Image: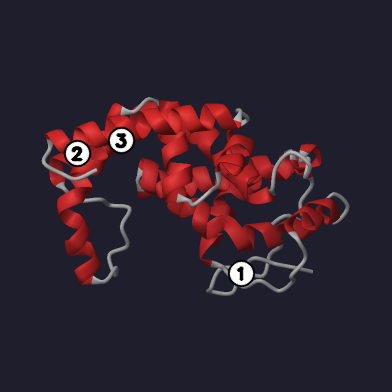
Amino acid sequence: MLRAGKKSGNKGPLFGQPEEDAPLLAEELHDEHESVVITEAFPDAEVITASLTDPERFTTLYQRYAGEIHRYVAGRLGPDMADDLMAETFLQAFRYRGRYDPERAGVRPWLYGIATNLIGRQRRSEIRFYRAIVRTGMDPSIEPMEPVIDRLSAESMRGDLAAGMARLNQGERDVLVLVAGSGFAYEEVAQALGISVGTVSSRLFRARKKMRATLEVRGGRA
């Protein structure tokens, strides 16, 4: 059976508990996002189907996507909230995996949609996070060991981008980050957010227009 353990060697199953005990997994999930070993190559949708009868199989999806979901949340709310919301994303996905419909969305957009909904409940925290970057020019979500040249080359733009993000409404931020930051196609963003492709396009247009205006005012480049 698949197991997701800490690098220190935690041997306990991650998703083997009954579903009613899922909230008890939260503390374990917080520290598991470092585990990236993939031991099986089954398609995501097949993993979900298998997990309906063998819950521990869901660990495979955690191993595949926990790291990027953690980075996504950290990039929008900061590292202090990333562990909790990443854990809650997978707990919700586990609880509601029986409702997953592969005809409507891929598993990756589905997971990002759950995470985005959780982020949406923290709107004020997200705005505070961006405003803190504007004030300090420092983004605490950036890994401290990131190459120095990369950090310096982005430093001058970080505050400008954060100022622009703070001006967007929630829907515009969601679409912009999923397209520009996470590399989703319009169709995948529509699946993740439960909106039409046309709505994705219009929100992205408004978001880019506002970002361009902010960068021009602050002396940046669109």
Number of residues whose C-alpha sits closer than 10 Å to that of mark 1, classed few (under 14), some (14–19) or many (20 or more): few
The answer to whether marks 2 and 3 mark residues whose Cβ atoms lie closer than 8 Å is: no
State the residue at coordinates (77%, 60%): 57
Which mark, by number, is residue 74?
none
Vertical placement of 49 versus 212: above or below? below
State the residue at coordinates (53%, 74%): 8
Drawn side of residue 30 relative to residue 40, left or right: left
Q: Amino acid at mark 1?
A: Asn
Q: CA distance from mark 2 to mark 3?
A: 11 Å
Which of the marked residues, 3 or 1, is nearer the chain's N terminus? 1
Q: CA distance from mark 3 to mark 1?
A: 39 Å
Which mark, by number, is residue 215?
2
Q: Which of label 3 and label 1 is nearer to you?
A: 3
Q: Which residue is mark 3?
A: 165
The answer to whether marks 3 and 1 mark residues whose Cβ atoms lie closer than 8 Å is: no
Q: Which of label 2 and label 3 is nearer to you?
A: 2
Which of the marked residues, 1 or 2, is nearer the chain's N terminus? 1
Vertical placement of 80 versus 146: above or below? above
Q: Which residue is mark 1?
A: 10
Q: Amino acid at mark 3?
A: Met
